[in-house]
Amino acid sequence: MRFNTALLHKASRPDKETGATNAPIYQVSAFAHESAEALEKVFAGKAHGYAYTRIGNPTVTAFEQRLNALEGGVGAAACSSGMAAVTLSLLNILSAGDELIASSALFGGTIDLMSDLSALGITVRFAEHITPQELAPLINEKTRAVFTELVGNPRLDIVDVKAAADFLHSQTVPIPLIVDSTTATPYLANPLKLGADIVVHSTSKYINGGGNAISGVIVDGGSFRFSPERYPTFENYCKFGRMAYIAKLRGGIWRNIGACLSPINAFLNGVGLETLGLRMERLCSNALELAHFFEQRGVSVNYPALESSPYYGLCQSQLGGRGGAILTVRAGSRERAFRLINSLRYALVATNIGDVRTLVIHPASTIYLHSSAAARESAGVYDDTVRISVGIEDIEDLKEDFSQALDHLEG
């Protein structure tokens, strides 16, 4: 299947009982069984079925299966938010005394999480760029994983996933690569096919598309062998072979933390998923044209599909020439950035990305408020940075809106 066909038909079938074309919303807490013995088998994993929505729900399962099929994984676990997905993807591997290498160009909330890991005895070492050259000096006998965003938000750097994965897997003791692909989406790239071991999405963003439901998902590629010698907590899960990571996740911390996705949010995200290709085509087109507009106005603009971007080559080879739907501009000062934002008529001042509406934000005073100046700069965030999450509006209206805002700024 091609992409848009796969969105509608891959791992998606009408409901067997009613013929409903969308997965029904099973908005319940618990599921009754005919006998104590039947429920025992479900709890023990010896029979298919559902017991409690925190550990499994048919609506959520339908959403997980569609994302897993789209990314080409062996299994997926949906979470209550993108941050929950990031957190659990890491804690499923890491223990006290372990070390994690992470990109310094992460979303502000994820950088804050990295600070929280220290309280659990986990050390995080940051790499300016996830390249073999910068990873090599950071790797030691305690390194257990590498985490990065495929397209940094908002630095908009692109990671060469294949080069990083090949390098990590070639180590004397191989290291798994976890990729947050929220900003790229499966429309631009499939990290698992590029060599990553685990992919994470904040599905609240582009997969949902309408800004109406918070969620996240972890997809296991089944490609990495978590040996019990190196990863002792996997000792009881090695028997699952390629499914070891997802089996441990669903049977352990994902289940026990309780950051489950609600059925209604799974339904809303499943509906949004079906138009992902159409929306991303429009969003990428609008973003590129708006980036060219800023260049013509002499505004400092960052967008990976521009020839002026240092990531233009990777954008062409890894993302098919599409740069996604986020761009940033430099206004000259914090005050000018605020004035630019406040002069816009159509763009909404909101912290989300991936909405059908254009959203703008001043990252330094919001999502990077708790980050140090050095951390903000590493993430591509300055006092005059404005992040624009481009929507599906008519591009001429967007250009006119930003044009009058720039005129107001210059005036």
Image: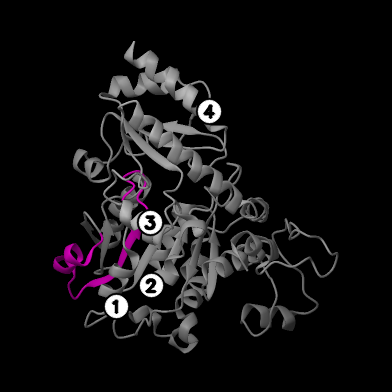
Amino acid at the residue labelled 2? Gly
Q: Residue furthest left?
A: 137
Q: In this figure, which residue is indicated by the disc labeled 3? A: 316
- Judged left or right of residue 174, residue 321 is right
Q: In this figure, which residue is indicated by the disc labeled 4? A: 396
Please say whether residue 95 is visible from this viewpoint: no
Residue at left offset 37%, top offset 53%: 151
Q: Earlier in the sequence, mark 3 or mark 4?
A: 3
Disc 3 vs disc 2: which is toward the camera? 3
Disc 1 vs disc 3: which is toward the camera? 3
Q: Earlier in the sequence, mark 1 or mark 3?
A: 1
Figure quadrant of the C terminus: top left
Q: How far apart, in angstroms, are the residues tagged by discs 1 and 3?
A: 25 Å
Pointers 2 and 1 in contact (C-beta within 8 Å): yes
Pointers 2 and 4 in contact (C-beta within 8 Å): no
Q: How far apart, in angstroms, are the residues tagged by discs 2 and 1?
A: 9 Å
Amino acid at the residue labelled 4? Glu
Question: Which SS class for mark 2?
Answer: loop
Magenta residues, as a range? 130-157
Q: Earlier in the sequence, mark 2 or mark 4?
A: 2
Pointers 1 and 4 in contact (C-beta within 8 Å): no
